[in-house]
Image (tube, grey):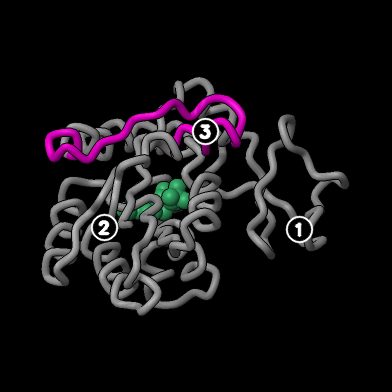
Amino acid sequence: MNLILLGPPGAGKGTQSQYLIKKYGLPQISTGDMLREARKNQTELGKKAEEFMNAGKLVPDEVVIGIVGERLKKADCAKGFILDGFPRTAAQADALARLLADDGKKIDAVLNIEVPESELISRLSGRRVCENCGATYHVTIAPTKMMGTCDKCSGSVVQRKDDAEETVKNRLKVYQESTSPLIGYYKDKGLLKTLPGVGSVGAISSSIDNVLTGVSG
Ligand code: AMP
């Protein structure tokens, strides 16, 4: 099954990807994670992407399309994949369709997770992430047991640069302008499955199960 997780930053795409990985055994392709890794290692790609990411802007299409194209060629994508945070523009969506068609593949469903903007701002600006293992926390909803220390690996728990409130507002604006048109794009193709992203993680996972019933890939 080839899936896209669509939704604004903070909608819970990463969290629900973890559920889908376990349930369907599919690899998660998160362009945000790949770009953060490249930035951390200061590779050519990481250096190119850094400035855009820190400002909450989109990394240029050709850069992101290139890394997704390479990733989709890997053997673990043969039986399906979960795209998290890609595509984010119409040009990326068109490029994805071409990449898949070249390989005789297609997208089976697009999960559109909806969350009100006020909730997104509070989720993102309170979000904290372990620098070592990537575990996520929230200052009030899901704090670490010891301040600044990861419960799972004792790594440092910090705020992502792009989760600072001003940058969050910019990321949401970018989502509205560049990414939300993809809702109509995939609706027209009959692939869109919209579900509410508010409530417990388990309840949202159950909604995903419901909308995926009958989707085959
Ligand atoms: P995310 O973790 O998905 O919110 O991504 C973090 C940042 O990485 C974004 O704010 C962008 O700067 C960059 N990024 C991730 N995915 C994409 C994409 N598909 N297109 C352009 N930029 C991206």
Q: Secondary structure at mark 3?
A: helix
User: Would you say residue 161 sits in the magenta stretch?
Assistant: no
Of the residues shown, which amino acid type is indicated by label 2?
A: Pro
Say which residue label 2 marks.
60
User: Going 69% across and 56% down the picture, which residue do you hit?
Assistant: 130
**Quadrant, the C terminus:** bottom left
Q: Secondary structure at mark 1?
A: loop
Of the residues shown, which amino acid type is indicated by label 1?
A: Ser
Mark on residue 204? Answer: 3
Q: Earlier in the sequence, mark 1 or mark 3?
A: 1
Q: Quadrant of residue 100?
A: bottom left
Position of residue 159 in the picture relative to residue 86 (left or right): right
Say which residue label 1 marks.
156
Of the residues shown, which amino acid type is indicated by label 3?
A: Ile
Measuring from the top left, give residue 34's x and y in whole percent: 45, 65
Gap in Å between the C-alphas at discs 1 and 2?
A: 30 Å
